Image: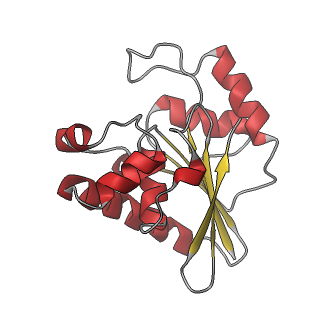
Amino acid sequence: MKTAVILRHAERQDRSDNASHLSQAGIEQARSVGTRFNRFDLVVTSPLPRAIETAIAMGFAVDITSPGIQEHSEQIMRDVQWDAGFAAWATAYQSKASVIAYVDHVTSLLKGWLDKVPDDGALLVVTHGGIVEALATGLSPGDDLVHLGEMAGYVEGFIAEASDHGVFLLSEVRR
């Protein structure tokens, strides 16, 4: 069984600067969460410094930086707030064309990365708020995702365990 760990980046220095680096608190958050995991066969992040630095502070080298994991349209932000939480993304996925297209796109990226992971291997993806929730929606499209709670906070997200039949079991990761 393959496992994917999908996390939001740690706290950054300046929320108004998209290229901002992790704060000292963010480094400590990432280090703490990193101790929960032994190893990953593949580590993917968005290309923004806070995502790359989170993986490294967790103790894992970055294999791939993917701009596609963070790119989205303004229409998506009108259809669902990035910080609305897992259930809101699941609801929007049922009726909003922009959300459906985006969720399907990022989920196809995730599944492609999982294909590169050996059986019984593990994938780490460090990305951003809203994207974590979109990926959970794509892996479990019929689920309301209420059990995953509110939006992913810093270095929070979910673990997806893939069965041999392509079904994913999702559980939350909280700091």
The x and y percentages for residue 123 are 62, 60
Pick the residue in front: 4 or 61. 4
For the point 68% across and 24% down, the residue is 27
In this rendering, the answer to whether 171 lies above or below 61 is below
Instruction: Note whether residue 129 is visible.
Output: yes
As drawn, the residue found furthest toward the bottom would be 165
Which residue: 64% across, 23% down?
A: 26
Provide residue 9's location: percent of width, then percent of height.
55, 35
Q: How many marks?
A: 0
Question: Is the N terminus in the top left, top right, bottom left or bottom right quadrant?
Answer: bottom right
Residue 161, horizontal then vertical, whole percent: 65, 68
Residue for point 33% across, 64% down: 104
Q: Is residue 13 left or right of residue 75?
A: right
**Where is 98 relative to 160, above or below?**
above
Q: Quadrant of residue 79?
A: top left
Left or right of residue 53, residue 57 in this image? right
Q: Nearer the viewer, residue 150 or 43?
A: 150
Coloring applied to the structure: secondary structure
Q: Position of residue 105 (x, y in %)?
A: 32, 61
Query: Is residue 76 toward the left or the right of residue 70 in the image?
Result: left
Along the viewing direction, whichever of 154 and 170 lies nearer the viewer: 170
